[in-house]
Image: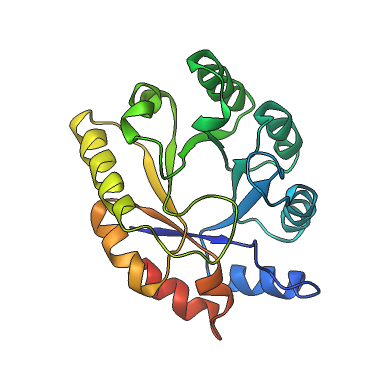
Amino acid sequence: MVEISTSILSTKKGKESETFFALEKAKTDYFHIDVMDGKFVENDTYQKMLEYSSYIKRISNLPLDVHLMVKDVKQAVDDFLAVEPNIITFHYEACKNKEEVLDLINYIKQNNCKVGISLKPNTKIEEIYEFLPYVHMVLVMTVEPGKGGQTLLKDMVEKIATLRKYVESKELEIDIEADGGINLQTAEPVKQAGANILVAGTAILIAKDFGVIIEELRK
């Protein structure tokens, strides 16, 4: 069963509570929290996402899916652990070496949180194979991280398929999340390639009825 993680990045100002309640009613599986620091990526959403996460935590029981696009991963992990997320995903490219990747994986797990590892489009999927036995999820960026509303890069579908094949050959139980440019047209090939969690933001938030589009994406 495919799950939907709704990115709240493009939530309209002043419509936050209305949007979050509507998403819960529409049965999104997760709230996707796009955390950017203005250094690892151009945009800076850090404080806004901390505020949104804290607010959601007060009004909803739905899990938070935190995606860190930041240089100082350890600091961001500490900041976002306070909102008790279901999972924290960090970027492989933000780490200096293999030891740092493993240290972060262990640190997040020790704080009773699931852990995911994410890759930018230009990073080869094979680079993270050695970490797969220790993580709960791989987030494959299907656009360059840092902005909402981009078009899905078609060759990322093949990357997801390669990862799914490897995961199954090693009998690993991990989720594969696709993030970027997901809409009703692009969701199908991404699902067929093996992604079982889809991150969608713009496609959901511009819809008249969140529930209808979430159900369509899930099919």
Kindly give the residue lying farthest to the bottom in the view shown. Answer: 208
**Quadrant housing residue 167:** top left
The answer to whether residue 77 is left or right of residue 149 is right
Q: Position of residue 114 (x, y in %)?
A: 53, 35
The type of colouring in the image is rainbow
Q: Where is residue 196 in the image (x, y as percent from the top left)?
A: 35, 52
Foreground pick, 120 / 207: 120
The answer to whether residue 193 is left or right of residue 9 is left
Q: Is residue 189 visible?
A: yes
Foreground pick, 151 / 1: 151
Q: Where is residue 67 in the image (x, y as percent from the top left)?
A: 58, 45
Q: Position of residue 52 (x, y in %)?
A: 75, 57
Q: Can residue 26 be seen in this view?
A: no
* Residue shown at the point (39%, 70%) measured from the top left: 217
* Residue shown at the point (58%, 43%) measured from the top left: 86
* Residue shown at the point (50%, 73%) measured from the top left: 203
Foreground pick, 58 / 133: 133
**Quadrant housing residue 183:** bottom left
Image quarter hosting the N terminus: bottom left
* Residue shown at the point (80%, 49%) measured from the top left: 47
Image quarter hosting the C terminus: bottom left
